[in-house]
Structure formats: C-alpha cells, structure tokens
Image: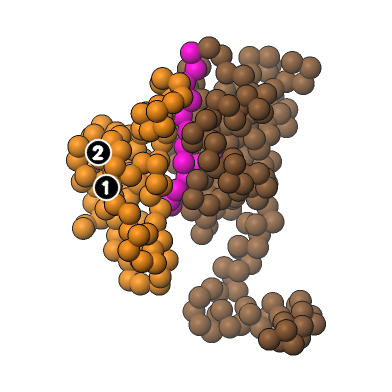
Amino acid sequence: MSGSPQLAVGSRVRVRDDWPETRGRVHIRTPHYVRGRTGTVVRCLGDFPDPEQLAFARPARILPLYHVLFEQPQIWLEGCAGDQLLVEIYGSWLEPS
Amino acid sequence: MAGTVLRLEEVAGERLLRAVAALLAAKGIASPTEITEQIAMTDNASPAQGARMVARAWVDPQFRALMLSDGTRAAEMLGIPMRGAPPLGVLEDTPDLHHLIVCTLCSCYPRAVLGYPPFWYKSGAYRARAVRDPRGLLAEWGTVLDPGVRIRVVDSTADYRWMVLPLRPAETAKWNEDRLAALVRETDMIGVTLPRVAGD
C-alpha cells in the first residue's frame, strides 16, 4: 500500500472486522469497539510507519492515517443521539463502505 | 540477578548517565544534543504551556487559526520545544460541540504541552467510560454542558496527540492574556472540565 491518501474527506468507510490478536502476537492500534463499524473520514492526518510492524522492530510500510468519525449511540446501542467518537485509524484497516 | 540490580543502584547517577549517553551516541540512537533537548522538553512540559496557547488563541485570531491547523507550529511559536514530540492536533469547542480526549489503548497524551497525564487518565475506568458513557463521566466531574451541546469523544489511538481549545468564558471579556492563561487548567484542555471563573 502506498502512503498517499486514497480516501477523500467525507468518504464513508468500514473498519475491517478483523481480530489479528486471535492469531498470534500482535500490536494493534485499532480499538475493538470500531471493528466492523462504519464511519466517515473527516481528516487525512498524513503518512506514518505501520505501528503493527514498528512494535516488533520490523521494517514498517508507510500508511495513510485518517481521522474517522462514528455515531456514538450506534456503536454502544445506548447514549445520546448526536454524540460522536473520533478515532485515528490507519488506511490498512479501512475499506470503502 | 538481584546482585546486578543492587550494583546498578549503587552507581552514582552522573556516572550512569554519562555511560548510557555514550552508549546511545556510539550506537547512533541519540546524540548528546538530542538528549539535552529531550530533557529540556520534559522539564518544560506542564499544563502552563498549553494554557499559554489557549490564552493566546483567545486573544489573537491569527494564532487561533494557526493553532487549529498546525498545533505543533503554534506551540513552537510560543517557544515550547516540540522537536521529537508527536504532532499536536488542537480541536476547537463550539457553542454546540464539546470535545473529550481519551486514549483507550494506553495513555497517549499531549505531554509536550500538558506535561504528564493525571493518574486517572491512564485508569481502565476513565478509558472505558469516556467512550461508552461520556455524559455520565462528565456529570461525575460536575461538568454541565448547555442543552443541545453534542459530545465528540476523541480516542487518541495513533500518531497524533490531541488537546482541546475550550470556549472562552463570557465573564473574561476584559481579561488580558496572562490572566486568561492562569484560568485554564489541564482538565479544561482535555475536555473533562470547562474553564470556570472563580465564584462562578
């Protein structure tokens, strides 16, 4: 994956419903509560080395980092309509929705 | 093993520091200059730095615009050392939007401008509740939002560090920058509380 942003601001994206921690030792920065959930890209934050590889001192690919906005009540099935969660997510975890 | 630890503790701090610094330089990990800069950054980091930024943003619209577009550069403009620190992002509260900062994965915190995080910031309870029940959490802090204000919880999970530019209290309209800076607390800059004029 190249480092340049592929997802435009305003894109609807789905976080991959993936659980690498069930397959071995990993370092993951994508919170559990957004896996498989859909949100909106609000900001491209730039390119950063993949922490999943950096954590093991492996050569790290460069990934675009996005600020993704989720509706809070849809995640927890409780809460106040209009409240939101804003999470930094690497491009490797996002797919167009 | 216990004997090794004991001997290390007995080494004078200065000698140990010199030895470690020499090793880091020899291995090309960090130069003496970088170490000195990092020590200066850590020593200078405190909520007073972030409060200076907030106060300047409240009185200077140009600085405010810079701070919201590039927090790192804004901090540097006020002489806050940022070299080697993660990029700083600043999110602005508005009359209908309130930001709350958390790191659910660990304890990511804008240390360069706020210093060490408060102990509870790293607690499992704060991290879990901030994202799931932010209104319950704020209520326990005595933080009352106006009706209709939405909450945006910011989970610091990656390479940025985030701080909040809170709303300036209306009572401070005639205050100067120094007095404003003295008003702003660390908890105001992560959205757990709102800047409050004493006696309010």
The Cα–Cα distance between marks 2 and 1, rounded to whole angstroms, is 9 Å
Q: Which residue is mark 1?
A: A16
Which element type, helix, strand or loop, lies under badge 2?
A: strand
Which amino acid does the dot numbered 1 rest on? Arg
Identity of the residue drawn at 63% across and 56% down: B41
Residue B146 visible in the picture = yes
**Relative to residue A1, is residue B162 depicted above or below?**
above
Based on the picture, tell me whether residue A59 belongs to the magenta stretch.
Answer: no
Q: In which quadrant is the C terminus of chain B drawn?
A: top right
Percent position of residue B155, x then y: 46, 41
Q: In which quadrant is the N terminus of chain B drawn?
A: bottom right
**Relative to residue B106, is residue B192 depicted above or below?**
above
Which element type, helix, strand or loop, lies under badge 1?
A: loop
Identity of the residue drawn at 40% across and 72% down: A57
Subunit ID for the residue under disc 2 = A
Q: Which residue is mark 2?
A: A13
Mark 2 or 1: the one toward you: 1
Chain letter, colour orange in render: A
Residue B66 visible in the picture = no
Side (left or right) of B11 relative to B21? right
> Considering depth in this image, is A54 or B33 the residue closer to the camera?
A54
Based on the picture, tell me whether residue B154 belongs to the magenta stretch.
Answer: yes
Percent position of residue B89, x then y: 47, 41
Q: What span is colored magenta in the figure? A: B148-166
Q: Residue furthest top?
A: B147
**Relative to residue B50, is residue B19 depicted above or below?**
below
Quarter location, residue B164: top right
Mark on residue B14? Answer: none
Asked if labels 2 and 1 share a chain, the reply is: yes
Side (left or right) of B66 relative to B178? left
Badge 1 crowding class, 10 Å Cα cut-off, few under 14, some 14 to 19, many 20 or more, is some
Chain letter, colour brown in render: B
